[in-house]
Image (cartoon, rainbow, N blue to C red):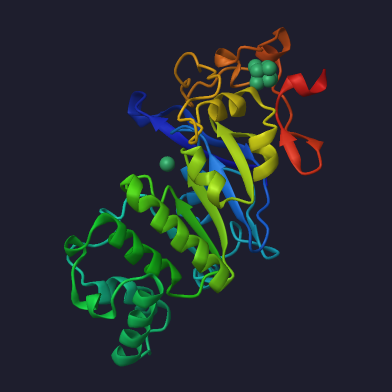
Amino acid sequence: RGLKTYFPITGGMFGATKGYVKAVDDVSFQVFKGETLGLVGESGCGKSTTARTILRLVEPTAGSVIFEDKDILSMPRKEFVKLRREMQMIFQDPYSSLNPRKMVRDIIGQPFKIHQPKMSNKDREDIVKGLLKVVGLDPSHLIRYPHEFSGGQRQRIGIARALALNPKLIIADEPVSALDVSIQSQILNLLNELQQEFNLTYIFIAHNLSVVKHLSDRVGVMYLGKLVELSTSDEIYSYPLHPYTKALFSAIPIPKVGAKKESIILEGDVPSPQNPPNGCRFHTRCRYCMKICKEEEPAFKQVARGHYVACHLMNR
Ligand code: SF4
Ligand code: MG
């Protein structure tokens, strides 16, 4: 609720703060138990920072994150560390998120060493073997190192590590972006199966809309630190309302004919989040821009059941 994560820009005289990158700027949404919420947007829109803020990997500037009725941003660190096992993250890059000097046994077993230090080596190893099977790897892989695996297999190791402590929520930050297209669907299918099997809730971050469409129950679209549209997957793909969402979706190729829908070209680059445009942040690139768009920020409002949009066109 009202989540803001600003990063100070230093470099003024005597290291003074020159300004802030408003990476996440007043974002509010809910995630329902058992669902997958997709978060999409171009790079730099704040989706990763939103994820990292939820898990307190970065401290927010303002706002709250409520997990099962508990405000995790204001609870003492010690209490949060306990709760943290219920929330895990899968990272984009399976190459750099696994310690190259550690065997798979220790990578996947590490969460137990932290949270259940009294567990015997034998018990831990048995659990790791079980986890390897669950993610489609061979239990004998446990004495191998990350470099001995393909990209897809490494992501499976990352997933096994995330599953180790029986989490409720998994935040997957572009989990297939670094993988070959042929491998992507295998990993997406695995995530789908695991969700059913372990009753998981996902926040799934991607810039690739076709990836999100497959997996998400609802989709949120971010632009320059703001959530601009949020709705069920079906609705947002059939009736996107925000001009930015429309532009993003028009770029998805239609697989059957191999042709593109009428493509709305997004003109200009994404403006800097250090100095975002006044009014609607999308106005510099929006082909529907009106006078009010440059002056007033549009509110994020419900326009149909469960469908939220921040755009002045909704008021006309
Ligand atoms: Fe475009 Fe105005 Fe809507 Fe922003 S508020 S998306 S500039 S029409
Ligand atoms: Mg990112």
- For the question of whether residue 146 can be seen, the reply is yes
- For the question of whether residue 60 can be seen, the reply is no
Q: Reply above or below: 233 against 291.
A: below
Image spot of residue 15 (x, y percent): 35, 31
- Name the foreground residue: 23 vs 142: 142
- Name the foreground residue: 283 vs 275: 283
At horizontal 37% and vertical 89% (from top left) the residue drawn is 119
At horizontal 59% and vertical 50% (from top left) the residue drawn is 216
Label count reads: 0
At horizontal 56% and vertical 30% (from top left) the residue drawn is 249
Quadrant for the C terminus in the image: top right
Residue sticking out furthest to the top:
291
Q: Is residue 293 left or right of residue 284?
A: right
Q: Quadrant of ligand 1?
A: top right
Image spot of residue 97 (x, y percent): 30, 56
Q: Is residue 192 left or right of residue 104?
A: right
Instruction: Identify the image quadrant of residue 237.
Output: top right
Instruction: Identify the image quadrant of residue 258.
Output: top left
- Name the foreground residue: 163 vs 235: 235
Instruction: Identify the image quadrant of residue 141.
Output: bottom left
Image spot of residue 74 (x, y percent): 61, 58
At horizontal 38% and vertical 74% (from top left) the residue drawn is 111
Image spot of residue 241 (x, y percent): 70, 28
Q: Reply above or below: 294 against 90.
A: above
Residue sticking out furthest to the front:
257
